[in-house]
Amino acid sequence: MTTLHIKAGPFDFEAVMEEADAPKTCAKFKTLLPYKERIIHVRWSGEGCWIPLGDLDLGLGYENHTSHPAPGQFILYPGGISETEILLAYGGVSFASKVGQLAGNHFLTITKGRENLEALGKMTLWQGAQDIVFSLK
């Protein structure tokens, strides 16, 4: 099982890749590591933060997909009717965009630092975009 370190804003998290359930998504994301971007608060989905990826085509379809990720779960929407994106749920999420409900591939789950998820979400909501870095542990 692959473990990642995630630094988001001032917070540190540890997460495991869901390689058994989302092998293609995990393999593709590994090729991007270390991955540095910024997260912003979601627009329609509820209590989550996202990384908009525009029209980036990762060559992925659906696997282990959900519209309701649990707090601490990362999903990757591979694109199609809305833009490609990565979303982290920190509370209740019903994954959607301006075109309606979406489903994303659950590929990563936070296992350590979960107590800081809500603080990260509220910081992103009220203070704006936060740096995020994913790296192999």
Image (cartoon, rainbow, N blue to C red):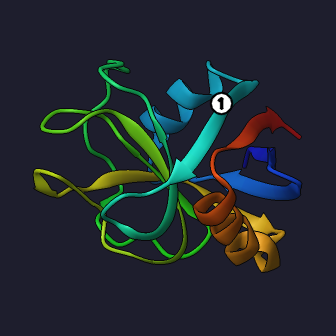
Q: Amino acid at mark 1?
A: Glu
Rendered position, 126 above or below 23:
below
38 left or right, relative to 58: right
Q: Nearer the viewer, residue 66 or 120?
A: 120
The residue depicted at 31 percent of the width and 35 percent of the height is: 78
Residue 29 percent location from the top left of the image: 57, 30
Instruction: Name the foreground residue: 55 vs 29.
Output: 55
| Residue 69 appears in the picture as rendered | yes
**Residue at disc 1, secondary structure:** strand
Q: Position of residue 62 (x, y in %)?
A: 26, 44
Identify whether 101 is placed above or below 97: below
Q: Residue furthest front?
A: 127
Q: Is residue 1 left or right of residue 72?
A: right
Q: Residue at x 71, y 24 (%)?
A: 33
Quick one: 4 or 90, which is closer to the camera?
A: 90
Image check: 62 left or right of 15? left
Q: Is residue 29 above or below residue 82?
A: above
Q: Quadrant of the C terminus?
A: top right
Q: Is residue 47 left or right of residue 68?
A: right
| Residue 84, image quadrant | top left
Query: Which residue is labeled 1 in the image?
Result: 37
Residue 20 visible, this orientation: no
Residue 116 vertical placement versus 92 (above, below): above
Q: Position of residue 101 (x, y in %)?
A: 16, 61
Residue 69 placement (x, y as % from top left): 43, 69
For the point 80% across and 50% down, the residue is 9
